Amino acid sequence: MTALTLSNVCKSFGKVDVLKNIDLTVEENEFVVFVGPSGCGKSTLLRVIAGLEDATSGTVEIDGQQVNDVPPAKRGIAMVFQSYALYPHLTVRGNMVLGLKQAGHPKDEIERRIAEASRMLSLEPYLDRRPAELSGGQRQRVAIGRAIVRNPKLFLFDEPLSNLDAALRLNTRVEIANLHRQLDASMIYVTHDQTEAMTLADKIVVLRDGRVEQIGSPMELYNDPANRFVAEFIGSPAMNFVPADMIGGNTGTFIGIRPEYAQLGQTGQLNGTVIHVEKLGADTNAMINIGTDKPFTVRAFGQHDVLPGAEVGISFDQAKVLSFGEDGKRL
Amino acid sequence: MNKARRNPFNIAAMHGALILYTLIALFPVFVIVINSFKSRKAIFREPLALPDADTFSMIGYQTVMKQGDFFLYFQNSMIVTVASLFFILLFGAMAAFALSEYRFKGNTLMGLYLALGIMIPIRIGTVAILDMMVATGLVNSLMALILVYTAQGLPLAVFILSEFMRQVSDDLKNAGRIDGLSEYTIFFRLVLPLVRPAMATVAVFNMIPIWNDLWFPLILAPAEETKTLTLGSQVFIGQFVTDWNAVLSALSMAILPVMVLYVIFSRQLIRGITSGAVK
Ligand SMILES: Nc1ncnc2c1ncn2[C@@H]1O[C@H](COP(=O)(O)OP(=O)(O)OP(=O)(O)O)[C@@H](O)[C@H]1O
Ligand SMILES: [Mg+2]
């Protein structure tokens, strides 16, 4: 059974078309990540799935049932917001209880679910505190707890970690991955963060300007991007693009080389001047001016002494090179 | 805290200015209250002197208690003010919520239309209002006053409250929707508590003009049993003789309820005024 099917979903605000013909299926227990540049419609798509916005056209099916006219509370979903959106006047327990009470669950059932969720998220010591008395990380866990107690078929996360600091983000990311393994539910997760997308996803959906650019597993997108946009968006540092005629290809087309597939040497297929070096300890990124608009980035593993200003050659394995046509499509 | 604020000279200057302003603002009130406890002669001989054994007199309060139905007037004013405030806040907040939360055709136009009343004084329509009240048989009823004051207060209330409601996080309302709260519950339980300071601001700005108004009580409800306090006090002001003891006593007593209401709202009011500046 598929957890979610979107067919031909469009959404316009007045004259502005924000989502254009979105088709997507999410399988049971699948972890799907939406990525894309700011303003491409990720949050809007999530709100359409949740029922907080009506689709202008197209159908939304959750668990095999069309839910276009079903209110958010009855869709069997739960949502975690970037701003936590906890009820400020209720305690942690109150925040988690509210939705269940509203749905009319029996008291002992509510107690059981709260106990389980607070155990999973280690929220027991805070149950009687108000959101204002919690740290950012704790608030986010409460927001996740509020979603878990609803026992949804489908979780929706809208950039849940973007307000947390780096260390906490890593911990919470692992926690979310654990939750996904423990809970019998599908998850849709919106993020800007490459690492979150690559590590969490079973399937990544790349969006641009309200359109789906490509859907695939993280490694598919990395190894086999459908077009230049996806190739550039997935992977960090981003893929290098070089006009193909610089290495004897067709004029107008481009070749793409990932920074980790290129090596520095005395000579190579391309030559240029080092303009900047970033040493990260585990690897070293060198930016090289080869006469194109953007510098060419080479990522070397380990620590290397490269000095800005040095003349270097760049070599790469021809088999790892991707070719893109003038329109940006893969050749 | 920054240095400028801790500098003793600045603190002294700041407090000096505030104390001076307080004195100026309170002076008329002070004069009214002390004179209400003096005999008629003493009021005119030494208006600024405190009452002493010779000049102390409760004659003003006695006249007020005996004359007319002072408590009835008092009660009328209270009913009109509290009911008007209640309706202004309720309908104002509901309209503001609709304008700020829902996208519908003519939303902006509706907002502008509702705000029009801020610029056009309601007294311009007095004759038409009187006509309507006569036609509906509401003349000489407190309802007439409550309706007019509600209409008078709504434009500013809608304007201020919708501005504040736009700032309430969408995510919070959406979280409520996902938890299955109705739009009414979201309005009353999530949004209203968050805009309470703004509501208090609106309440205070409306309260005093309504309490003090002479115009509409005189025109719409001059009957003995619907007189408000301000109108009732006018009996002591004659064309030829004015019973100053009674006038001052009535005014002193009229200040009290306003002060009580003000104290209730003021904590919230201060937060409402400053929150706009800090955010
Ligand atoms: N209520 C609305 N009315 C009009 N336009 C809107 C509304 N909500 C969103 N938009 C527009 O829709 C587009 C997509 O917005 P959305 O919030 O979905 O982007 P996003 O991909 O989530 O971006 P980000 O990564 O910055 O969160 C934006 O161009 C935005 O201006
Ligand atoms: Mg977003």
Image (cartoon, coloured by chain):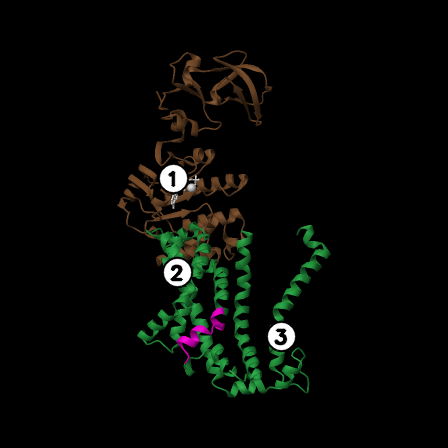
Chain colours: A brown, B green
Is B165 displayed left or right of B133 in the figure? right
Q: Nearer the viewer, residue A93 or A79?
A: A79
In magenta segment, residue A32: no
Secondary structure type for disc 2: helix
Q: Nearer the viewer, residue A219 or A295?
A: A295
Q: Residue furthest front?
A: B240
Q: Both on one chain, marks 3 and 1?
A: no
Mark 1 nearby-residue class (10 Å; few <14, some 14–19, many ≥20)? many
Chain part drawn in magenta:
B209-222
Is A12 displayed left or right of B69 in the figure? left
Circle 2 chain: B
Residue A254: percent from left, percent from top: 40, 19
Amino acid on which the number 1 mark rests in the picture: Gly
Circle 3 chain: B
Quarter residue B180 falls in: bottom left
Q: Which residue is mark 3?
A: B30
Q: Residue at x 46, y 60 (%)?
A: B193
Q: Which residue is mark 2?
A: B94
Amino acid on which the number 3 mark rests in the picture: Phe
Give the quadrant of the N terminus of chain A: top left
Amino acid on which the number 2 mark rests in the picture: Met
**Which of label 2 and label 1 is nearer to you?**
2
- Rendering quadrant holding ligand 2: top left
Residue B52: percent from left, percent from top: 68, 84
Q: Nearer the viewer, residue B187 or A223?
A: B187
If you read the primary sequence from the N terminus, does the residue marked by circle 2 or circle 3 appear first? 3
In magenta segment, residue B218: yes
Circle 1 chain: A
Mark 3 nearby-residue class (10 Å; few <14, some 14–19, many ≥20)? some
- In the image, which disc is placed on residue A41? 1
Q: Residue at x 52, y 70 (%)?
A: B261
